[in-house]
Image (cartoon, rainbow, N blue to C red):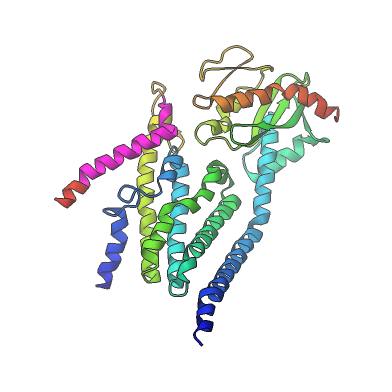
Amino acid sequence: MAKNTLRKTFLEPLGKNNPVFVQILGICSTLAVTNKLQNTLVMTLGVMFTTALSSFTLSLLRNHIPSRIRMMVETMIIATFVIIVDIVLKAFYPEMWKQLGPYVGLIITNCIIMGRVEAFALQNKPMLSLVDGLASGLGYTYVLLAIAFVRELLGTGSLWGFRILGSWWTNWSIMIMPPGGFFVLAILIWVIRETIMKEAKA
Amino acid sequence: MNAQPTFYRERIYPLLFMFIVTFLCILLTAGIYLLTQDRASANELSFTRRAILQAGGVSFENTTAGIELAFNEKIVVEDGYYTTQGPEGTRYIIPLQGPGLWGTIAIMVGLEEDMKTFSGLAIVSQNETPGLGARIEESWFTGQFQGKTAPFVMVEEGTASAQNEVDAITGATRTSEYFLNLTNRAADDAQSIIRGE
């Protein structure tokens, strides 16, 4: 029984309850950071770290938080973890920190984090909340990496900063601009919902 | 009788709880900040020095130690600017800043002894749109100023050919314009900085 719950908690955010293509959360950052694989990976790792630890911490505190100020407490704790990510990146990965610029701070506003806290961590035990947070972060990560793969390849002809397509390739500048994010995300959501999710339902 | 516990639970407890959470969070972040402060400021110094070396056209090994070594050996720190010895005499390296699309763009400009020809250019800090305006950091963009003389003219990306033409960035016209203004006033600003005005 317990093992089943754990399995379900872990697998749901990866598939039929994915934060990006099912819950349509965290779209702002999905559109903003996915024009380069490298930036996307660091950003999503930051989100995964923050979702997991803030879900865990808030689940620990869940029986003590006065419900009328719970959102303040949630924001405070999420912000703390994000600032830690920012400080650590600045000290140990300065090049990456410089490239990501304002986006690290914007992890705070990612609705997935607060969404998982409100919807899951406040009703469940700490370890289970940690798993849910991690899995949600992971579900977010792989979708964003898929989008970034398409956008970087079509937009700059390279992957991970290395040139893949030859000089014959004309960069689709629109792909690395915000509209490109909308196009790729929308197509991805459509394809997944029409194929994989329809089959699962039938 | 009942009033007091309610008052505590409704007013005092939330206040106290928030206070304690805030205190702990600040303690944690302040602690980590202080632990990494030295590293962070060393990184920042290294970034600035690398920009100075790039602007001066000095070759260096791209590590913290390599940057420090090259900086100490080749760069002379003057009042408000830097100099180095290039093949054609003294090169002046001037810090400049001006408005960009979203925030201030700070750059280092290296000028040959004639105070007109660019020996190099490097970005110190900028807040332009990632993937678009932020491409001013890419080496193909900064590198194209080398050996050219202001005033520059921006042309469509990939079409620069004449001595004073530079490629603009597609999708970042405004950033390109701001950057052009900044580089075009470099020679004048250099004169006044070196004269100490």
* Residue nearer the viewer, A95 or A17: A17
Q: Which residues are magenta?
A: A171-196
* Residue A84 located left or right of residue A13: right
- Give the residue drawn at x 40%, y 68%: A122
* Residue A93 located left or right of residue B77: left
Q: Is residue A172 magenta?
A: yes
- Give the residue drawn at x 44%, y 37%: A35
Q: Position of residue A178 (x, y in %)?
A: 43, 35
- Give the residue drawn at x 32%, y 38%: A186
Q: Position of residue A160 (x, y in %)?
A: 44, 38
Q: Tell which residue pokes out farthest to the left in this image.
A: A202
Is residue B98 at least partly visible in the picture? yes
Instruction: Please tell me whether the stretch drawn in magenta is mainly helix, strand or loop.
Output: helix
Does residue B137 sit above or below A194 in this rendering? above
User: Dividing the image into 4 quarters, which one contains the C terminus of chain B?
Assistant: top right
Residue B53 location, quadrant: top right
* Residue nearer the viewer, B56 or A199: A199
Q: Is residue A115 magenta?
A: no
**Total marks in image:** 0
- Give the residue drawn at x 75%, y 30%: B94
Q: Tell which residue pokes out farthest to the top in this image.
A: B162
